[in-house]
Amino acid sequence: MRIVFVGAVETSRVALEALVRAGRPPALVITLPREAAHRHSDFSDLRSLARACGSRVFETTNINSPETLEAMRAVDPDLTLVIGWSQVCREPFRAVARGGSVGFHPAALPRLRGRGVIPWTILQDEQTSGSTLFWLDEGVDSGPILLQRLFLVASDETARSLYAKHVQNLADMVPEAVALIEAGSAPRIPQDHGMASICAKRTAEDGLIDWRWPASTVLRFIRAVGDPYPGAFTFHGGTKIHIDGATFLPEAPQYIGIVGQVQAYTEKGFAVLCGDGRCIDIQEWRSPLEKRPPMHCKLADGR
């Protein structure tokens, strides 16, 4: 089976490696040029891996361009796999491979279609998630489901741990899906569009902490937007402080102060008062000053 593989992020690398292990190296790998790496915080350069397994490589920033379609037609593909590509694949692209085009989405479709899905899963306090391979159609993450693996979201889930669960599922699912397609027995289960929800794109600026939130919300936010994404942050004066890890501070003693104020120094970091009167213990942070912010200073939005 001649496969065209499209991708440019960490999940793309995992799926490509799974194909190679299964003895199914793609005929063509389409990926972003290195100078476009800034488009993804989890960008992965696939060129050396692709060439090592004998695949042709085509670099593009436009998956629907005539040049991209020409490169695809040159290998006469049976199947196109799109794993980790943020552009909508138009009908001419989907029509190139005679067996169709399959995409991957790190959510239990039809829930949480769209962008920034791993952070949104945690921010929405979803109890379950799912890794989904689906047939591409004219919509966004709306095509029939080929395979789906559901799992529970842990109460302390981080973006990195949730990402890892999807990666593991993907590595298992891709070879299985290709085998089903080759055998002519791949499912096409229609999505219930009435149950769909759609996530908006997130940017690095969306990582700004609002200290008026309850402590539990601030902690969930820190877990949701961290590695492999740009992360949560706050400001002291004009200095940006990235916050990578935090926990609840014990309720006793009670700290009384201004929301966003540094109330105490702790063993590993510093305590900040949140909107519900509880403090969180900031244990992992990054700052150009390389030291804790001053006691009783107020952290804010940097304006």
Image (tube, helix red, strand yellow):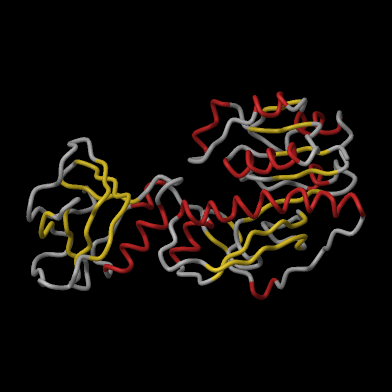
| Figure disc tally | 0
Q: Residue at x 47, y 57 (%)?
A: 119
State whether residue 256 is above or below residue 49. Answer: below
- For this rendering, which residue is in front, 272 or 176? 176
- For this rendering, which residue is in front, 253 or 188? 253
User: Residue 230 is drawn in which quadrant?
Assistant: top left
Q: Residue at x 75, y 46 (%)?
A: 90
Where residue 205 appears, as percent x and y from the top left, is 37, 48
State whether residue 271 is above or below residue 193. Answer: above
Where residue 253 appears, as percent x and y from the top left, is 10, 71
Is 278 placed left or right of 51 in the picture?
A: left
Q: Residue at x 60, y 27 (%)?
A: 33
Where residue 200 appears, as percent x and y from the top left, is 52, 58
Q: In the rendered image, which quarter contains the N terminus? A: top right
Where residue 213 appears, as percent x and y from the top left, is 28, 67
Q: Residue at x 50, y 70 (%)?
A: 126
Is 32 placed left or right of 178 in the picture?
A: left
Is 167 placed left or right of 191 in the picture?
A: left
User: Residue 274 is drawn in which quadrant?
Assistant: bottom left
User: Residue 169 is drawn in which quadrant?
Assistant: bottom right
Is 141 placed left or right of 76 in the picture?
A: left
